[in-house]
Image: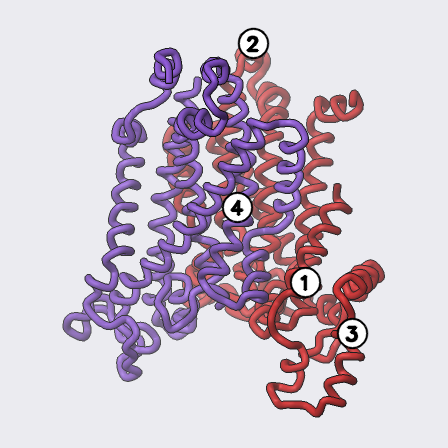
Chain colours: A purple, B red
C-alpha cells in the first residue's frame, strides 16, 4: 500500500454520517423510518402486547379501542391487529434483507470480475445475465414455489436470482470506469494482487453506489415478496406477514371492515417509500461525487 | 437472440419442473394407492418414464405446434386452458399499458415543463404511488370506488366490450399505478436533463419558438429514456397481472398459474410460464425496434456494423 494509492482513494470517500446529512430532510426522515422499522422487525415479538396467533372468533372485525388494550382492534379471525403488525414486520423485513444481501453479493462478484477480466469471460457473464432478464421476479418465484414448495426461503432465493442481472449491469459499468483509473494501474505495477486491489480499493470506492442500489432494491424486494405472500406462495398463514395480512383480510374490505387490510398495506407503503426516497437521494449523491 | 432466449428459458422451465419432487399420478389418484397395472398404464400414457431429453424435445415440438401438453389435474389440454384465459390477461395488461403511457408520460411532461406547485405536487404524489404494491392498490381502489362510491363492480369478468372495460377499469388502475408513477418520474427527469443541455440553450438563443423547441429538441432526445422505462414497466406488468387477477377474482392466466403452482399441476405451470416469458421477451424486442425508429443514431450504428 503506497501513499499514491491512499491519496487517490481519499477524496471520493466521505463518512456515512455526512453522506446521510447531505441527502437532506427527506433523506433523514426516511432513514429514521427505516431505523424504526428495523427496530420493530428485531424486537417485534418482545414489544407486541398480545399473542399474534391466538384466535378469538367472537372478536372478529372488532374496531380500534373498543376492547381495552387492543389499540387497533382485531382482524377477521379475532387476533390482535397491532400485535400481528408488529410481529409481521420481522418476516416482511427479513425477506427483502436476504434478497438484497444475496443479489448484491453475487451481482458485485460477477460485475467486478467481468470488468476486471474482460474478454470472453465478460461476454459469457453478460449474455448469461441477459437471458436471466427474461424471467420476471414474480414468475421465477412462482416457479420456485412449484418446485421447492411455497415459503419465504424459496421466494427470497428466486427474487435474488431475478434481481442479480440488474445489479450486475449497473455495477459492471461502474467497475469498468473504476478499473480504468490510474491508481489501479499504479497498484498493479507495484505488484498488488487483483483480489486485494478489488477488495481494498475498487469495491470501497464503489460503496456509495452499491449502498444506493441496495437501498432501492430493498423497496422493490419488499413489494415483490409481499405480493408473493399475498398470492399464498410466500410466508404461510397463520404466520403474520404484511402481505399475508392484506390477503387474509381482503374480505373485510367488502364487508365494511377495511382497517386490518389497509393497516398492513399502509405499513408496506410507508417502509417502501422510505427506502425509495433514501435510495434515490443516495444515488444522486453517488453520481454527484463522481463528477 | 430472441429464439436463443426462448430456447434457454423453455429449457430452464421444463428442467426445473422435471426435477421437482412430487408425482403427477399421486395428484391424479388423489393420494389413493393404485394397483401397479394402472400406474404402468398411466405412466405409459403420459410418458412419465421416458428420459429427460426425449420428453423435453417432444414438449418443445408440441409447443411449436400450439400443443402445450395435457393437464392431468384438469383432464384437459393445456392449450385449451390457456386459450380460454389469455384474453383477460392480455386486455388487462393492454389497458394498464395505455394508462401508463398516457397518464404516466403526460404527468411527467407536465411536471418537467412546469415549475412550482404543479411540479412539486406531481413529485410528491408519484413518490408515494410508486411505492404502492398492486395488491394494496387493489384493495384501496375497491374500497373507494366500488364499496363507498359504487361506481364499479368489485369482482369477475364482464360481458360485451363496454361492460368488460367497465369491469377492467379498477384492476387496470391497480396494476398501472406504481409503474405509472415511475414512468412519470423518469419522464420528468429526462425532460429536465435535456433542457439543461447545450444544444437546447443554443436553440433558445437562436430564438426558436418554445413549442418547436420542446417538440424538436427536448422531446425527441428525451424519448429515449422514456421508451426504456416504459418498456421495462410494461413488460413487468405481465407477471404482476397475476396479483391483480387474484385480488379482483379475474379469470386470467396469472391467477390460474398461481392456482396451478399451489396444486402442482406441472403441465399448466410450464405452459403458462413459457407464454409469459415469451410475451416478456417480445415486449423487450418491440422496445429495441422502437429505439431504432426513434433514434437515427441507433439505426445508423446498426447499419455501420
Evaluate whether label 2 is on the same chain as label 1.
Answer: yes
Q: Nearer the viewer, residue B41 or B122?
A: B41
Front one among A250 and B152: A250
Q: How many marks?
A: 4
The residue singled out by tag 1 in the image is B272
Identify the element where label 1 is drawn: helix
Residue B118, percent across and down?
Answer: 41, 34
Q: Is the N terminus of chain B in the top left, top right, bottom left or bottom right quadrant?
A: top right
> Dot 2 falls on which chain?
B
Residue depth check, mark 3 versus mark 1: number of the one nearer the observer:
3
Q: Is residue B225 above or below residue B281?
A: above
Q: Are marks 4 and 2 on the same chain?
A: no
N-terminal-most mark, 2 or 1:
2
Circle 3 crowding by C-alpha within 10 Å: few under 14, some 14–19, many from 20: few
| Residue linked to disc 2 | B202
Subunit of label 1: B
Query: CA–CA distance between discs 2 and 1?
Result: 53 Å
Which one is closest to the eye, mark 4 or mark 1? 4
Secondary structure state at the residue bearing disc 2: helix
Mark-to-mark CA distance, 3 and 4: 36 Å
Distance between mark 3 and mark 1 Cα atoms:
21 Å
Cα–Cα span, label 4 and label 2: 41 Å
Foreground label between 4 and 2: 4
Callout 1 environment at 10 Å: few (<14), some (14 to 19), or many (20+)?
many
Judging by the rendered image, the residue that carries numbered circle 3 is: B47
Tell me which label, 3 or 1, sits earlier in the chain.
3
Label 3 resides on the chain identified as B
Name which of mark 2 and mark 3 comes first in the sequence: 3
Instruction: List the residue tagged with mark 4.
Output: A163
Label 2, label 3: how far apart the Cα atoms are: 70 Å
In which quadrant is the C terminus of chain B drawn?
A: top right
Amino acid at each position: 500500500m503506497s501513499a499514491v494509492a491512499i491519496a487517490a482513494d481519499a477524496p471520493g470517500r466521505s463518512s456515512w454520517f455526512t453522506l446521510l446529512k447531505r441527502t437532506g430532510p427527506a433523506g433523514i426522515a426516511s432513514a429514521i423510518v427505516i431505523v424504526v422499522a428495523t427496530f420493530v422487525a428485531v424486537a417485534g415479538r418482545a414489544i407486541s402486547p398480545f399473542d399474534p396467533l391466538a384466535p378469538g372468533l367472537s372478536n372478529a372485525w372488532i374496531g380500534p379501542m373498543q376492547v381495552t388494550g387492543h389499540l387497533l382492534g382485531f382482524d377477521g379471525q379475532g387476533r390482535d391487529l397491532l400485535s400481528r403488525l408488529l410481529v409481521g414486520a420481522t418476516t416482511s423485513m427479513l425477506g427483502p434483507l436476504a434478497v438484497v444481501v444475496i443479489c448484491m453479493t453475487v451481482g458485485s462478484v460477477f460485475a467486478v470480475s467481468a470488468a476486471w477480466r474482460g474478454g470472453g469471460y465478460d461476454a459469457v457473464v453478460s449474455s448469461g445475465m441477459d437471458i436471466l432478464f427474461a424471467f420476471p421476479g414474480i414468475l421465477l418465484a412462482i416457479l420456485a414455489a412449484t418446485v421447492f414448495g411455497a415459503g419465504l426461503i424459496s421466494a427470497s432465493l428466486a427474487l435474488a436470482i431475478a434481481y442479480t442481472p440488474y445489479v450486475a449491469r449497473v455495477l459492471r459499468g461502474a467497475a469498468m470506469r473504476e478499473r480504468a483509473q490510474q491508481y489501479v494501474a499504479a497498484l498493479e505495477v507495484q505488484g498488488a494482487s487483483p483480489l486485494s486491489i478489488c477488495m481494498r480499493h475498487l469495491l470501497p470506492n464503489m460503496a456509495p453506489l452499491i449502498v444506493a442500489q441496495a437501498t432501492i432494491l430493498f423497496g422493490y424486494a419488499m413489494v415483490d415478496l409481499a405480493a408473493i405472500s399475498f398470492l399464498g406462495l410466500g410466508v404461510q398463514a397463520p404466520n403474520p406477514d404484511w402481505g399475508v395480512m392484506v390477503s387474509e383480510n381482503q374480505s373485510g374490505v367488502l364487508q365494511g371492515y377495511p382497517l386490518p387490510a389497509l393497516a398492513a398495506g399502509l405499513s408496506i407503503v410507508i417502509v417502501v417509500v422510505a427506502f425509495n426516497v433514501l435510495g434515490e437521494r443516495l444515488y444522486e449523491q453517488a453520481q454527484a461525487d463522481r463528477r | 437472440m430472441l429464439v436463443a432466449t426462448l430456447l434457454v428459458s423453455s429449457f430452464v422451465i421444463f428442467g426445473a419442473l422435471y426435477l421437482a419432487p412430487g408425482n403427477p399420478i399421486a395428484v391424479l389418484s388423489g393420494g389413493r394407492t393404485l394397483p401397479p397395472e394402472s400406474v404402468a398404464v398411466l405412466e405409459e400414457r403420459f410418458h412419465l418414464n421416458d428420459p429427460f431429453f426425449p420428453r423435453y424435445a417432444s414438449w418443445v415440438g408440441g409447443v411449436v405446434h400450439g400443443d402445450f401438453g395435457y393437464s392431468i389435474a384438469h383432464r384437459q389440454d393445456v392449450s385449451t386452458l390457456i386459450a380460454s384465459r389469455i384474453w383477460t390477461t392480455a386486455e388487462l395488461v393492454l389497458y394498464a399499458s395505455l394508462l401508463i403511457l398516457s397518464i404516466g408520460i403526460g404527468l411527467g411532461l407536465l411536471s418537467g415543463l412546469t415549475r412550482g406547485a404543479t411540479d412539486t405536487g406531481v413529485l410528491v404524489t408519484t413518490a408515494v404511488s410508486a411505492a404502492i404494491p398492486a395488491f394494496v392498490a387493489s384493495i384501496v381502489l375497491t374500497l373507494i370506488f366500488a364499496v363507498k362510491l359504487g361506481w364499479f363492480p368489485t369482482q369477475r369478468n364482464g360481458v360485451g366490450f363496454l361492460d368488460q372495460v367497465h369491469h377492467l377499469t379498477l384492476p387496470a388502475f391497480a396494476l398501472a399505478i406504481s409503474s405509472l408513477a415511475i414512468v412519470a418520474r423518469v419522464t420528468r427527469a429526462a425532460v429536465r436533463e435535456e433542457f439543461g443541455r447545450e444544444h437546447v440553450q443554443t436553440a433558445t438563443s437562436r430564438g426558436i419558438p418554445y413549442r418547436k423547441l420542446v417538440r424538436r429538441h427536448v422531446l425527441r432526445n428525451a424519448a429515449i429514456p422514456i421508451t426504456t422505462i416504459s418498456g421495462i414497466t410494461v413488460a413487468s406488468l405481465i407477471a404482476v397481472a397475476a396479483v391483480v387477477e387474484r385480488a379482483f377474482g379475474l379469470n386470467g392466466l396469472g391467477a390460474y398459474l398461481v392456482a396451478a403452482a399451489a396444486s402442482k399441476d406441472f403441465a399448466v405451470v410450464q405452459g403458462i410460464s413459457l407464454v409469459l416469458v415469451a410475451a416478456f421477451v417480445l415486449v423487450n424486442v418491440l422496445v429495441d425496434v422502437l429505439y431504432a425508429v426513434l433514434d437515427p443514431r441507433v439505426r445508423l450504428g446498426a447499419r455501420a456494423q
